[in-house]
Image (cartoon, grey):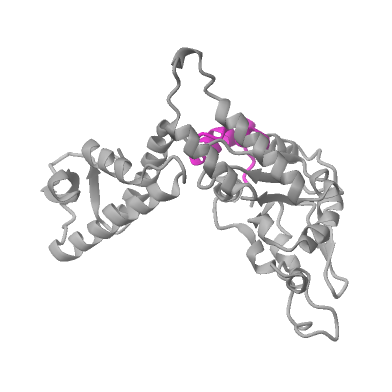
Amino acid sequence: MVRMLKAEEIREFLRREIIGQDEAVEAVVRAVTVAMLGVTDPKHPLGTFLFMGPTGTGKSAMARALAKVLHGDEDKVVVVNCTEFKHSHEVSKLIGAPPGYVGHDQPPFIPPEKIQDRFTVVVFEELEKAHPTLCDLLLQMLENGELYTAKGEKLDFTKCFIIMTSNVSAREIDDITKEAIGFQPPNPPEEDPDKFDRHIRQVCMQALERSFRPEFINRLDEIIVFRRLKMDHLQKILDKFLLDTRARFAIAGIGTVITDEAKAFLLQKGANLRYGARPLKRAVRQYLEYSLAQFVMHHGVSEREVVYVLADPSNDTLRFEVRPLKKGELIVMN
């Protein structure tokens, strides 16, 4: 059951989930709003997007966030990993092999029942890694919202949002990002803060035109270049990761309080402006989740106790203390 929401509700949710990417959020909100009003072209997908830009900035996460706000479950996404279609003969897996060929009895990669629900989110990840034949095959889907299997069965994408991600200019973007990190402007007040983001966009669009045919590009509703994350974005993303971690431990009956010094330690270990949010998530997993789980297994925590997470600079790690939960005290998700 799709949740009918106002544009502002969708925007607010996506901005909480995808930090620092307001342009991408607005593009998705526009498409969802029109779809919810029921005024989309009935012979076209509800929205077709290509997301490009620096790694670790939320391109794939946007698809999961969209599914979460629409269906209440981020796993309600049909994912096509394009690395599985590197060779021309592998592209046939998407629609199934024709009769008489090996594998003709196997179902297509996207069976009809997976896309029959209203507002299904379909994401093609790392599109540039697929053989060019795949993009040729997708032209009909982007234009008319349909694709036919090798057996002649129609796959109807007119009720779907199609999101494609690409790292086609990853190496060039990394070079630009390294330059941005090391750049020290001689006169900060006059320096254009969006200079490198515009440079990244230019590089991405040039790479897009080199890598994909004009008829494919022309069938996309929106081409969004994600912005590189800055330190204030990473701080907000860390808070989001910690909220999720604490919630999972709370479900297991373990209350936690994460101190500011522990947050600063995790940010210092995981903040990486070149690679975005992923190193930060690894730092949370390595220094907090694994260590906290081992601590709880070894020491045990009762329902009247809470674990405080603190930094231990002398050992370059986090440390944990079990403290009694005071009468009337409410441990909030800080």
In the rendered structure, does residue 296 fall within the stretch colored magenta?
no
Left or right: 122 as drawn, with respect to 58: right
Pick whichever, 178 or 152, lies toward us: 178
Q: Is residue 11 magenta?
A: yes
Q: Identify the residue at horizontal 72%, vertical 52% (top origin).
A: 118
Question: Horizontal and vertical percent for residue 93?
Answer: 74, 72
Q: Residue at x 63, y 44 (%)?
A: 52
The answer to which of 64 and 117 lies nearer the viewer is 64
**Camera-nearest residue between 49 and 33:** 49
The span picked out in magenta is 3-27
Q: In the drawing, does residue 27 fall left or right of residue 307? A: right
What residue do we see at 73% from left, 80% from top? 106
Main secondary structure type of the part rendered in magenta: helix
- Image location (x, y in percent) of residue 121: 66, 53
What is the x, y in percent for residue 4?
64, 41
| Image quadrant where residue 234 sits | top left
